[in-house]
Amino acid sequence: MPLFRHCLILASLAWVAGCGGGGGDSGGTPTPPPSAFSDPVTYSTAATSSLPSAEELAFTSKHTLAIDGTTYAYTATVGHLTAKDPGSGAAEASFFYVAYTLDGASANSRPITFFYNGGPGSATAWLHLGSFGPKRLVTGNPSTATPAPFPLVDNGHSLLDVSDLVFVDAVGAGWSEAISPNVNSSFWGVDVDAAVFRDFVMRYVAVNARQDSPKYLFGESYGTTRSAVLAKALELAGVELRGVVLQSSILNYNSNCSVVLNANCEGNLPSYAATGAWYGLDSPNPAPADVPAYLVNARAFAAGVYGPAVAQFLSNHTPPSAQLTASLANLTGYAAANWAAPNINVHAGDFVRKLIPGTLLGSYDTRVSAANGTPLAAGGDPSSTFYEGGFASAITSYVASLGYTTPSKYILLGNAINGWNFRHGANPVPDVVPDLAAALTLNPDLRVLSLNGYHDVVTPFYQTEIDLARLPANPNVTTRFYFGGHMTYLDDASQAQEKADLEAFYAQSGNAP
Amino acid sequence: MSRIRVTGATLALAIAAAMPTARAADPPAPAVIETPYRDPYVPPQSRPPQPAEAKRGAALQAQAQGELAAAFAAADTAHKGTLTRDEARAGGLGYIANHFDDIDTAKRGAVSFDDVVRYLDARRAAAATRPR
């Protein structure tokens, strides 16, 4: 059994208990460090709930991790920090976080990355236990042969060799909660959420003296929406970022045809082509190694032929020609009759149900499928149904293994999504490309890395390329693609490639002045 | 629902209570999934029937600059058209306060949004010359 040394710290008072460690020269029996911290506070993510007040408690433990043959000693810190209004100093919310910091590193030069999932209303367990933390759940993605519980293993592709890592849960998720007189729903909106995340980041930086550390944001899905608004907010507040990593982006809800049904689904077409190729339905069907080149052509067809045809249909119901529907069927494997009527603007929800009759594909990862009527298909998405239960049980037991326990329920996916104020600027649903443009204007050395899965039809990769192409040409914005769905990192091979691309990104952005 | 405000004293009790647990603890309850909705779901009543116009290129850049101008104006509560370093800091514009000396090239002790734009342009030009 590994011997961990634990400390309980109260950040705001610099009060430390049980950190004696190897003492014993104090005369009597050395006080053993506490092996765990049972948080007596009850947390709720209900819309109208709030904490009367909050302390900044944290519990630390020591660990090691081997990455590429080198052993890294690190500290895991689990606890809460209080975001405060920068003007009044009033407490806003108590954020639950888990931080991993490399022992012995200089805070001046050691990068730090803040990770969060999206939803809105999702806890950050997916990134925490699936991607680049020190431990990782092995799901076998895209296979569904071995169901949960998934093995939790040392993550040989953790980002910990490159950056310190902070995984933080939004207000309304995990064990994060508003502080009175605010309530949780006070922070359920595009702008208020980004503002309170800004205040969390600033609090973390202040408490841990990370002012000079190169800073990065790593958001997924709605977390990319948050990242654009947050990057602008942090830059305005004087917190300079080095990089923003966008995992499976939704930067403009207006352009996503699953959200706005009259939006042009042009951006989905290459994902449909990738999915058809995976199932051997495209004609001619590309070999796996040829898929990237195949999708270059699919993008060109989407931009030059399909997108304009959809625009015609949406403006005056011009039906597609038989030649076009045949071409689309060859490109994607989706039957010509499905493109012909009643709507050439094929939505992802139809594609995943009709590509293979009797079978439902995952929207999050179309490579995962299940026969209609099976338990895996019952939840509406075989890919997410397969892994969600495994993450739900692993996150609470893993955090307990770091020494932190609470009787409160950990909310993995909460109801915030139903009460969220999606309005942003003049738009009913957010377009945050202008926010990203503003952040890049304030900080022209800021780098953006967009990571995308070919088989994700909820935030399709080509739509993200279209959205990012609205920015003025900028060599600091790079895009990468992987075999995989929304959570590309669940796929072992893609996770290794993603880690290599992240290493290159951190090395490049580290050159900033 | 009762909540306990954690003080040093109650915390010590919590630690003391936790210490004798040599026996294997029950595994914690799994995390809870409260909603069937996943990103990028938007409740139907919040969805517009048509997508908003997506500005690009120079028009997008103009919009972004307009939003920065609005942030400047919001901090300029005295409506002077300028901000001192302290006013910028108080208005949440740490960016301007941190770079104040570089923005205030005329050394007036206060900067206009035009001064900020000149600084942004100079910074962009300097960044463009750096190796990628």
Image: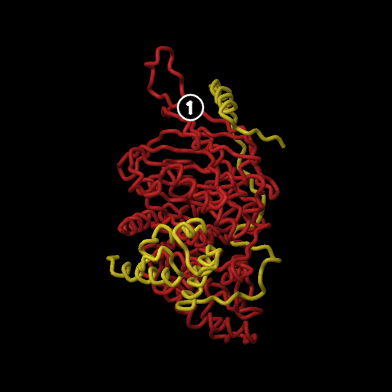
Chain colours: A red, B yellow
Q: In the drawing, does residue B82 fall left or right of residue A39?
A: left
Residue placed most toward the observer, A60 or A268: A60
In depth, the one of B126 and A406 nearer the eye is B126
Q: Does A409 sit left or right of B122 as displayed?
A: right
**Residue A468 on image: x %, y %:** 46, 70
Check the image and name the residue furthest to the front: B108
Circle 1 SS class: strand
Label 1 neighbourhood size at 10 Å, few (<14), some (14-19), many (20+)?
some
Name the kind of residue labelled 1 in the image: Ala
Instruction: Name the residue: 68% across, 66% down.
Output: B46
At 59% from the left edge and 60% from the top edge, which residue is drawn?
A: A190
Where residue A154 appears, as percent x and y from the top left, is: 41, 41
Residue A188 visible in the current orientation: yes
| A199 w.r.t. A273: above or below | above
Instruction: Identify whether A275 is placed above or below A159.
Output: below
The front one of A111 and A274 is A111
The chain carrying label 1 is A
Q: Position of residue A161 (x, y in %)?
A: 35, 46
The answer to whether residue A214 is left or right of residue B8 is left
Residue A335, by quadrant, is: bottom right
Which of the image's four quarters has the N terminus of chain B?
Answer: top right
User: Which quadrant would the C terminus of chain B be assigned to in this image?
Assistant: bottom left
The x, y position of residue B40, in whole percent, is: 59, 62
- The residue tagged 1 is A17
